Image (cartoon, helix red, strand yellow):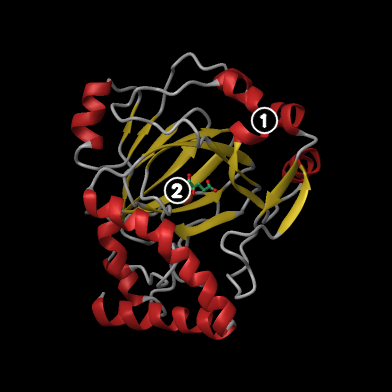
């Protein structure tokens, strides 16, 4: 193990993180044997399935294809009791949003934007590669962010295997396997860790258990694909304006599949109900629990 200090402009990452393994290309067989089966993350640098997206997709093209759409935007404000589960913080026309991304740093991100529903023509630009696991064809999701915007450390509700294709610019990705959850100040009845942690520069006096967490990091560049195994925690920080598309495959490990089902059918509804009943006290209680549990068990 080594301590990685990573010079990304002013971003220093003193967490103990391994580099995410990288390959230029990989056969399906090797991917299955070396990464999918053992559930290890990977970056494929020169993924090439002859997609038109590789030459066409950039912010200008997205503006042309989707400029008139009204898009939901998220910033990095902490969850409040009167927010719905994953409700957007603002809305804007896509053309105005892309102008904003290109002109100045912005906290606003687009999160989980389903291309199939919104701009079906974009489907012609990519296909569903055979990585040795069946990809869900109904859920190609796009994510956009401006310089310095970030997505909180979270895991996806469905514990999916995620293939994250990046376009334009550079994005810092920090990952933790689900097995590290006990060190991460996870908020109960949610999919996130404590929102006050800056994973790009954590304060260990405040968050001592983080020092024990064993994770991965890398800067994802235009044209690269990141594979995130089931239930992996991920924090993403846009170092420059850019966007990505995630394709996903169902969780196969039975315990993950069960947790996914519980999260979708029960957890999120329970959380919304408790926010209605108890208001901000519920959020404050969960944040406190995250700290107490991690300090006790981590
Ligand atoms: O890139 C982002 O902003 C978040 C990506 C993400 O959370 C995902 O692909 O599941
Ligand atoms: Fe995610």
Q: Which mark is residue 47?
A: none
Which residue is the site of mark 2? 173
Which residue is the site of mark 1? 119
Q: Is residue 198 visible?
A: no
Q: Is residue 104 left or right of residue 43?
A: right
Q: Which residue is located at x 27 percent, y 20 percent?
A: 27
Can you say which quadrant of the picture contains the N terminus? bottom left
Image location of residue 246, percent across then percent down:
48, 38
Q: Which residue is located at x 81 percent, y 43 percent?
A: 96
* Up-down relation of residue 19 to residue 169 (above or below): below
* Up-down relation of residue 152 to residue 39 (above or below): below
| SS for dot 1 | loop
Furthest-front residue in view? 265
Nearest the viewer among 66 and 148 is 66
Nearest the viewer among 132 and 194 is 132
Q: Which residue is located at x 64 percent, y 49 percent?
A: 147
| SS for dot 2 | strand
Measured Cα–Cα span from mark 1 to mark 2? 27 Å
Image location of residue 112, percent across then percent down:
56, 46
Image location of residue 219, percent across then percent down:
46, 42
Quadrant of the image occupied by residue 162: top left
């Amino acid at each position: 193990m080594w301590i990685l200090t990573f010079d990304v402009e002013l971003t220093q990452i003193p967490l103990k993180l391994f580099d995410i393994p990288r390959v230029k290309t990989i056969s399906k067989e090797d991917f299955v044997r070396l990464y999918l089966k053992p559930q290890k993350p990977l970056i494929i640098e020169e993924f090439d399935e002859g997609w038109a997206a590789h030459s066409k997709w950039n912010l200008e093209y997205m503006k042309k294809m989707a400029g008139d759409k009204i898009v939901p935007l998220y910033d990095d404000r902490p969850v409040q009791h009167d927010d719905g589960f994953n409700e957007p913080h603002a809305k804007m026309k896509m053309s105005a949003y892309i102008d904003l991304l290109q002109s100045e740093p912005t906290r606003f991100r687009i999160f989980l934007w389903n291309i199939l529903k919104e701009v079906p023509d974009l489907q012609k630009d990519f296909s569903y590669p055979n990585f040795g696991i069946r990809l869900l064809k109904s859920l190609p999701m796009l994510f956009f962010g401006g310089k310095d915007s970030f997505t909180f450390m979270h895991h996806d509700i469905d514990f999916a295997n995620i293939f994250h294709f990046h376009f334009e610019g550079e994005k810092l990705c920090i990952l933790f396997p689900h097995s590290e959850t006990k060190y991460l100040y996870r908020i109960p009845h949610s999919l996130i860790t404590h929102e006050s942690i800056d994973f790009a520069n954590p304060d260990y006096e405040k968050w001592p258990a983080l020092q024990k967490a064993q994770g991965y990091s890398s800067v994802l560049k235009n044209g690269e694909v990141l594979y995130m195994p089931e239930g992996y925690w991920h924090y993403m920080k846009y170092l420059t304006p850019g966007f990505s598309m995630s394709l996903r495959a169902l969780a196969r490990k039975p315990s993950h599949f069960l947790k996914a089902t519980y999260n979708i059918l029960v957890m999120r509804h329970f959380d919304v109900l408790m926010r209605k009943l108890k208001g901000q006290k519920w959020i404050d209680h969960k944040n406190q629990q995250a700290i107490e549990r991690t300090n006790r068990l981590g």
